[in-house]
Image (cartoon, rainbow, N blue to C red):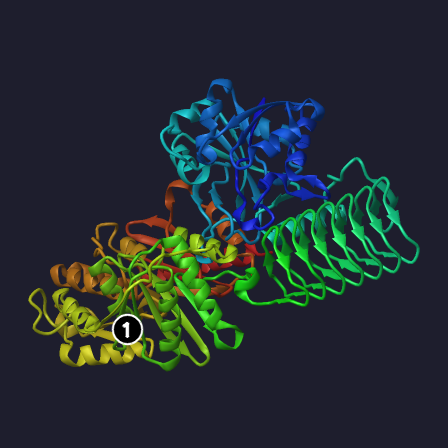
Amino acid sequence: MKAVILAGGMGTRLQPLTSRLPKPMVPLLNKPVLEYVVEYLQQYGVTDILMALCWKSSVIEEHFGDGEEFGVKITYLKEKTPLGTAGCLQLGEHLLNEAFLVVSGDTISNFDLHAAIQSHKSSDCIGTVFGVCKSQTGEYGSMITHSSGRILNFMEKPYRTEVYSEYINAGMYIFEPDVFHYISSDEPQDICKDILPLLLERGIHMFKAKGYWSDIGSHSDYKAAQFDLLDGIVDLSPKCLLNTDSKNKICIGEGAVIEKGTVLEGPLLIGKGTIIEKGCKIGPYTAIGEGSHIAAGSRIEGSICWSHQKIHSCTHVIGSVLGSFCEIKAFSVLNNGSVLGENVVMEGENVVKEHVRVWPATRVAKGTHLEDTFSAKYFPEKEVFCSKGRIDFSMEEGGTIKAVKLAQAFSAACGKTGVIAASDGSALSALVTNLFTDSLRSFGCPIYLEEDPVPPSALRYGCYKFHRMGAYAFSAGQVCSILLFDGAGQVLPAEMEKSIESHYSKATLVSSKITGTKTRISGLAKEHDHSLRSEGIGEGSSSGPSYGLEMDSLSYRFYRDLMEESFIVKLEPADFSKGPALIFRLNEREQTLELKGAHGDLPITPSIISEIFNHRFKLSEVETPIQLLASLLKEIEEDSLHKEKLCLYSKAACQHVSCRSGHESRVLSRLISDEEFDRIRLSEGINIHHGEGNWTRIASLKNESVLSIITMDQRPEEALKTNEVYSKKIKHFQK
């Protein structure tokens, strides 16, 4: 079997380490990651390798040549422009006339390749995806499978509440040649996003891969993989090492000099030809590259130092990563998480704060302390968004700096698009709004600033009407939050969030020759009020009755109560031919709409509405909570049967079941496998159909280790019994 190694990535999340080096050539224990991949394939007899290259391709070609030195034959597929993980396969189509393997050039693993190939042959599918069991799957694409092993659906980097499986895509595949019928030669394509969804109907199989797997995607992942190798968790150690102390896991390369008085504490690796002077302490989980010189009295611990370092006396390097040919002069301190690119020179008595990045070939003056965002690109590893479209800023934890950085990342991801900005009117919200919008202007974005306090729904209406992106600020105590919306008034899609987070983490530079304009506007609230009346909410509306609500007072209460986070709409029985009152609670800040039920508050979402009305309900174009409510009221006005179905939903059984943190995806995965294939629909949770309009929905709750069970049944007493069945299953699957 032939293999294609995808080795064309730029590795932007690993910058500055990859500013001058292709990501697959980043060293692990002083050997490129890509070399581990080639050795892995060779071990299983896969010696005919096609290597897809793009960024800095010459570096890889010079290292591997024709592959003879590594016991393989390498054919290079060179992309003139990035073609994506699928597009680059087209370059080798004429060489791939039977089933072939696709592996990533920046991951290491020890999966049983023979077992994977046999599993693929037995499946009779067009493709097999290697799946790895991970308790936290949000950073990766997850796969939903049936008990047969067939893949039902893919979720590309899902939110926590959308994780239905503990298996993630490991970036390794086996494809039949027919896959090329699904790959376009005209544009870049991605295997995960573009090709796998097309193959679902043909049938895709998941191979449950067992063993070690690590994706070298971020600085923390890179360090973790290095530490795993040092610990011996996976046996991929370089063959050239002289293991001088197996008990303490201390490996010293040929020709290295360790002077007396040096303290070595494993696990650690010292490369060949390296000199460590007396009085040094080299602590655990350290790897020092070949040809380095560590001067007397220095301390290095938990760090990855590439080749040819020159560390002067009394220097401390703690939990850091140093690219090749760095020089750190005396009495300097590099703190945990700092990363230096190649050829950095620090003139001495320097301090580098936690998580600071220093770009290649930077010279830092003597006595300089690198601790702010802009001098050396400081960014913590935390996720930017705390929930869909929402970013929190704590004024006690550098929130003002974060607002400026967010603006920079937003501009890099979204371009110089116009932005409508508004707030709840508090002093803190106004401060953060001004910081964010003025920063956007400096990057060339025009700003439209609403002068009056408005609810989030009014801003979203403005985004929809004027096709502009939006930013809404509100505060509670010393924490201010910004909600970001797209040009249709929707919460930012996951793909755009990931793009912003990516640019935030690498502090992408954004330049502009002009400053964006700032236009002050007002009246969004009134325009939004008018639009609500036209949707059928309100007395005197041309398109619908008042539904028992006095619109004049509702308009006032609507805005006032939204500032207090929620308002209530109550539909009295007198407004309809029959049925009880329906009470809706709308929380615009949390972007939720709920219906008061007999057993607790029940969520109202587009997916649930689709289930209630058996997929016959036409949603409004803007599916914000208030627009969803408006659409519901219109439907009720036109068809009383819809109100009867909502009344039935209000009697649905509803309960919450505790689930151990990190186990939600495992439980949901087992619930899916336990059901019949054609009864399941995945949307905002697992929807299990029982026939005749009866269904159960099981979903994770945001920011809580709880699973929600809702069952709608024509016989409410049966709904309670069904809920209890699934409650017992959830508890059982956690054992």
Q: Mark 1 is on which residue type?
A: Pro
Q: Is residue 246 visible?
A: no
How far across and down, in percent of the image, does residue 656 sit?
45, 65
Q: Is residue 530 above or below residue 707?
A: below
285 left or right of 277 in image = left
From the image, which quarter does the C terminus lie in?
bottom right
Dividing the picture into quarters, in which one does residue 392 lie? bottom left
Compared across the picture, whether 696 is left or right of 296 comes to: left
Residue at the disc numbered 1: 455
Quadrant position of residue 336:
bottom right
Q: Nearest the camera: 388 or 17? A: 17
Q: Secondary structure at mark 1?
A: loop
Is 622 drawn above or below residue 237 in the view shown? below
Q: Is residue 191 above or below residue 384?
A: above
Of 283 and 153, nearer the camera is: 283
Question: In which quarter of the view is residue 443 placed?
Answer: bottom left
Q: Give the percent coordinates (x, y) of residue 18.
A: 58, 45
Classify residue 314 as left or right of residue 170: right
Residue 347 placement (x, y as % from top left): 69, 60
The quadrant of the image that shows the N terminus is top right
Q: How many marks?
A: 1
Q: Is residue 66 visible?
A: yes
Q: Position of residue 130 (x, y in %)?
A: 55, 37
**Residue toward you, 655 or 487:** 487
Does 655 sit above or below residue 321? below
Residue furthest right in the image:
260
